């Protein structure tokens, strides 16, 4: 079954640069075994077993290898608003697309860019056919950012990122407010999301999915966590 597509509701797991999701899965091996690939395969397994929409957001170095190894949507964590030419150390949207990436996160709380750069980045991403999930700290920022034309806005209260209490439990109002302002089919929410109940609450309040990281990347058993998360999509 080939499931390389973007459909809602969706669970997007941002691998960030957690060692479990960006490191070497087998330091004894002669050639690096990409943890990103290994973890992405767990996501693919859950997506195939359950039919759930699950995507992964991977660091730039591992993107091509992950795309070559799984049939679920793969996102870049960032792209720059540039074209081919005299740039050093930037992430070129065309290259990202050409290795098989479906979309990109932009303006993550850990990589915020100013409004003009965000606007240009969204335009460049759309030019090359990348799906855009732009991040916002709150409902007001989400309302502004949706005007720049991303496909989805992921609302993540920064103070809850990486914590033990989810946005669904700690701040359901930000979900409600964001959906009221942007409408259904436009809002993902994230920060502290860990289980199916967090997903269920988010969807009940009108979100189209969740963006999360540590709940899966640092879990002892990511497969079990993903199965639980997916249960909240129903
Ligand atoms: O991009 C997802 C993120 O910032 C939320 O992180 O660890 O709270 O799920 P976490």
Image: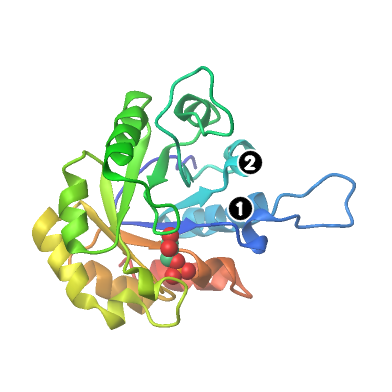
Picture quarter with ligand 1: bottom left
Looking at the image, which residue sits at the far top? 85
x, y (%) of residue 139? 18, 62
Q: Give the class, few, some or many, for how many residues have Cα within 10 Å of label 2's Cα (few <14, many ≥20).
A: few
Quadrant that contains the C terminus: bottom left
Mark 2 highlights which residue? Answer: 61
Q: Secondary structure at mark 2?
A: helix
x, y (%) of residue 85? 51, 17
Q: Residue at x 32, y 48 (%)?
A: 134
73 up-or-down from 171: above or below: above
- Marks 2/1: CA–CA distance: 17 Å
Which of discs 2 and 1 lies nearer the camera? The answer is 2
Whether residue 141 appears in this view of the structure is yes
Q: Nearer the viewer, residue 133 or 71?
A: 133
Q: Nearer the viewer, residue 143 or 6?
A: 143
- Looking at the image, residue 155 sits to the left or right of residue 49; the answer is left
x, y (%) of residue 156? 32, 65
53 up-or-down from 178: above or below: above
Whether residue 205 appears in this view of the structure is no
x, y (%) of residue 190? 35, 66
- Looking at the image, residue 96 sits to the left or right of residue 179; the answer is right
Color encoding of the figure: rainbow
Of the numbered discs 2 and 1, the one sitting upstream in the chain is 1
- Looking at the image, residue 48 sits to the left or right of residue 61; the answer is left
Which quadrant would residue 119 be assigned to in this image?
A: top left
Question: How many callouts does the rendering have?
Answer: 2
Residues at marks 2 and 1 touching, judged by CB atoms closer than 8 Å: no
Q: Give the class, few, some or many, for how many residues have Cα within 10 Å of label 1's Cα (few <14, many ≥20).
A: some
Mark 1 highlights which residue? Answer: 41
Q: Secondary structure at mark 1?
A: helix
Q: Residue at x 23, y 62 (%)?
A: 207
């Amino acid at each position: 079954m080939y499931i390389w597509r973007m459909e809602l509701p969706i669970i997007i797991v941002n691998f960030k640069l957690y060692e479990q999701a960006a490191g070497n899965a087998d330091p004894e091996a002669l050639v690096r075994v990409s943890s990103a690939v290994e973890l992405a395969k767990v996501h693919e397994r859950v997506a195939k077993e359950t039919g759930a929409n699950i995507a992964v957001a991977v660091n730039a170095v591992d993107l091509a290898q992950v795309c070559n190894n799984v049939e679920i949507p793969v996102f870049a964590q960032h792209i720059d608003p540039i074209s081919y030419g005299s740039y050093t150390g930037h992430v070129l949207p065309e290259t990202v697309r050409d290795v098989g990436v479906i979309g990109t996160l932009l303006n993550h709380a850990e990589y915020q860019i100013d409004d003009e750069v965000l606007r240009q980045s969204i335009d460049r991403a759309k030019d090359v056919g990348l799906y855009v999930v732009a991040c916002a700290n709150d409902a007001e920022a989400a309302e502004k950012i949706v005007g720049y034309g991303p496909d989805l806005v992921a609302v993540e209260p920064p103070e809850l990122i990486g914590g033990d209490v989810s946005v669904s439990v700690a701040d359901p109002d930000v979900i409600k407010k964001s959906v009221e302002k942007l409408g259904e089919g436009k809002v993902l929410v994230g920060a502290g999301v860990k289980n199916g109940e967090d997903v269920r609450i988010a969807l009940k309040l009108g979100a189209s999915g969740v963006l999360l990281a540590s709940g899966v990347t640092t879990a002892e058993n990511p497969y079990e966590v993903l199965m639980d998360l997916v249960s909240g999509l129903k």
